[in-house]
Image (cartoon, rainbow, N blue to C red):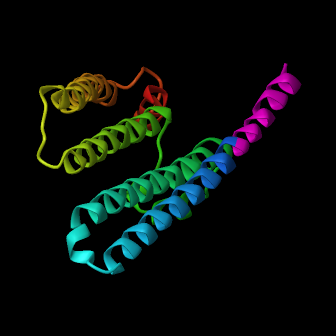
Amino acid sequence: MRGLLSFLLGLRAIMLIGSAGAMVGALLMFLQGGLYLYEAWHTIMAPGGEAHERAVTVPVLEAVDAFLFGIVLVIFAYGIAIGFVFTLPEDYGRRLPNWMKIEGVSQLKGILSEVVIVVLIVIFARVVVEANGNFEWSMLVLPMSILMIAVGLRMIELAGGKGHAANEANPKPGRGKARATEEAH
C-alpha cells in the first residue's frame, strides 16, 4: 500500500508539464502584447498620426489585455509548480508576497474567472471604439453578460466565504485549526 501511495504521489510531477505550458503561453502573450504596441506605435508615427487616434486605441487595449493574461499565466505556472508539486521551506514561504501564495485550485479558478471578466470588458471597449458612435441595442448583450458573470462569481465567493469562516471557527475534533483550514481548501 505504501509503495502505491509513493507511486501516486510521484505522479504529481506530471503537473510540471501544465506549469511549463502556462509559462510558454505567458511568453506568447507578452510577445503578442508587444506586437500590438508595435502596431499602435507605427500607426501614431505615420503621417497624419493624430487622425488615427481611434486606430491606436484598439491595439493598445489589446496589448493591455494580452499583458494582463500573460501575467495571470505566470501566476498559474508558479501556482501549479509551487502549490502542487514542490514544497517550499517555511521561512521562504513567509517572504513571498501575498499574491504569489496560492492556497488551492479554487484560488486559481477565481483568478482565471476575474481575468475572463477583464478580458470581456476589454473586448467590449474595443467594440465601442470600433463602433465609431454607431451604437446598436445588440451591443448591450456583452456588458449584460459581464454583469451576470460578475454577480454569479460574487455570489459564489460570498457563499464560499461563509463556509470557510465556519470551518475556521469550528475546527474538526482532534485536529488543529490550521489542519482543519487546510482540509477545507
**Is 185 located above or below residue 163 in the figure?**
below
Quadrant of the snapshot with the C terminus: top left
Specify whether residue 5 is painted magenta.
yes
Query: Along the horizontal axis of the image, is 9 left or right of 154?
Result: right
**Is 35 located above or below residue 79 in the figure?**
below
Seen at 85% across and 18% down, the residue is 1
Q: Position of residue 90 (x, y in %)?
A: 55, 57
Seen at 42% across and 20% down, the residue is 173
Q: Would you identify the image quadrant in which residue 15 lies?
A: top right
Q: Residue furthest front?
A: 47
Q: Nearer the viewer, residue 164 or 111?
A: 111
Q: Position of residue 179 (x, y in %)?
A: 48, 33
Q: Position of residue 22 (x, y in %)?
A: 60, 48
**Is 45 located above or below residue 86 in the figure?**
below
Residue 86 seen in the figure: no
Q: Residue furthest right?
A: 3
Q: Which residues are magenta?
A: 1-17
Seen at 49% across and 37% down, the residue is 104
Query: Along the horizontal axis of the image, is 44 left or right of 25?
Result: left
Q: Nearer the viewer, residue 18 or 47?
A: 47
Q: Position of residue 148 (x, y in %)?
A: 21, 24
Seen at 47% across and 28% down, the residue is 175
